[in-house]
Amino acid sequence: MIRRAARAVTVAGLALLPLLGSGVGGAVASGGAPAPEASPAGPRLVLDWAQVEVGGWVGVGITGMPAGWDAVTVSSPALAAPVRLTPKRKGASDSRRFPESEGEDVRAGIAPGSYPVTATRAGHTVATTRLTVTAPAPALITRFVAGPKSGNLGSADSTPRVTVRPGSEVVVLLADHNPAREEDTLTVRSTAFREPLSISTDNSDDPGCKCDDGATVYAGHTTLRGDLPAGTYPLTVVSHQGKQTSTAQLSVGGRPVTHYGRWVISGGVAVALAGVLALVLRRLRLKRR
């Protein structure tokens, strides 16, 4: 995804890893000698990032392949699954590469370190390189705010400057420049809420504030308890698989917002229907006379 690529660029930037060791990148025949069809330079594995986080992704490609090649398989203890590379066009010595190709998942359960990456063809190694895997970046939360659902969550209409009324609807927003992988929903807890609130990415409550460019935004709304005394109430969210705890303060005051229950609405509808029925019956009686 775009946000993962942006994070990888911040860590390392675009880089090509050179071959390690003499003759490692050359095509190898069954007897160990270079295959006759190999080019003088030999095949070379290319990774789009010099290093990548645990659980991240990396683009993989190969260049310098001999004429007539059809496919190679790239494998590594760092990759979640083997990668099959094919010529980017007929007769090409290069395979598809980033950004044309999709990135390959790096395993989430491995330790940081340097891992071998090997390309094989017909059971023979044709090229190798290494991938450096780093620890996941810590959270970089730049905003954790709440405010009236009708507001824009700017500095003047969100916590801690704004005071919201008991029983009112509020929007909660958290912006993280280093979100955890595959963590699209977070839970916000507060004694001011009737129940825990789920905030998520790509949520319609996201106001699209320009100050959040580049960050992953989690948003959602809820209704405050109507019996809250005036005061300040903490909001807490735990992210990054339990490793990051963020807090904000919500100021509550003023008269509670009145919410009419369903029974009131239902009663009003029943009264209206009864009035209509009475009017119809009256007209029928008049016609009979």
Image: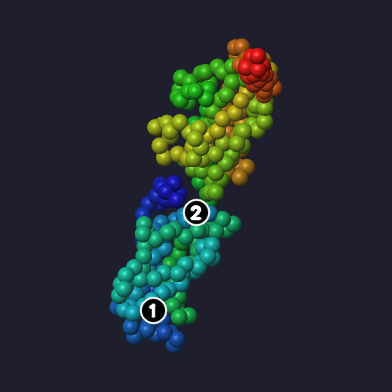
Q: Which residue is mark 2?
A: 56
Q: Residue furthest top?
A: 255
Residue 261 makes an appearance in the image: no
Q: Work out whether mark 2 precedes mark 1 in sequence or the reverse, and give the earlier one.
A: 1
Query: Of 268 and 95, which appears nearest the observer?
Result: 268
Query: Of 133 and 274, which appears nearest the observer?
Result: 274
Where residue 275 sits in the image (x, y, percent)? 65, 16
Where residue 260 sits in the image (x, y, percent)? 64, 19
Q: Which residue is mark 1?
A: 27
- Label 1: few (<14), some or many (≥20) within 10 Å? many
- Splitting the image into 4 quarters, where does residue 273 fall? top right
Where residue 90 sits in the image (x, y, percent)? 31, 73
- Splitting the image into 4 quarters, where does residue 128 fall? bottom left
Q: Amino acid at mark 1?
A: Ala
- Label 2: few (<14), some or many (≥20) within 10 Å? many
Q: Residue furthest bottom?
A: 31
Q: Amino acid at mark 2?
A: Gly
The kind of secondary structure element at disc 1 is loop
Q: Is residue 46 above or below residue 51?
A: below
User: Could you tell me how many numbered marks the image carries?
Assistant: 2
Which of label 2 and label 1 is nearer to you?
2
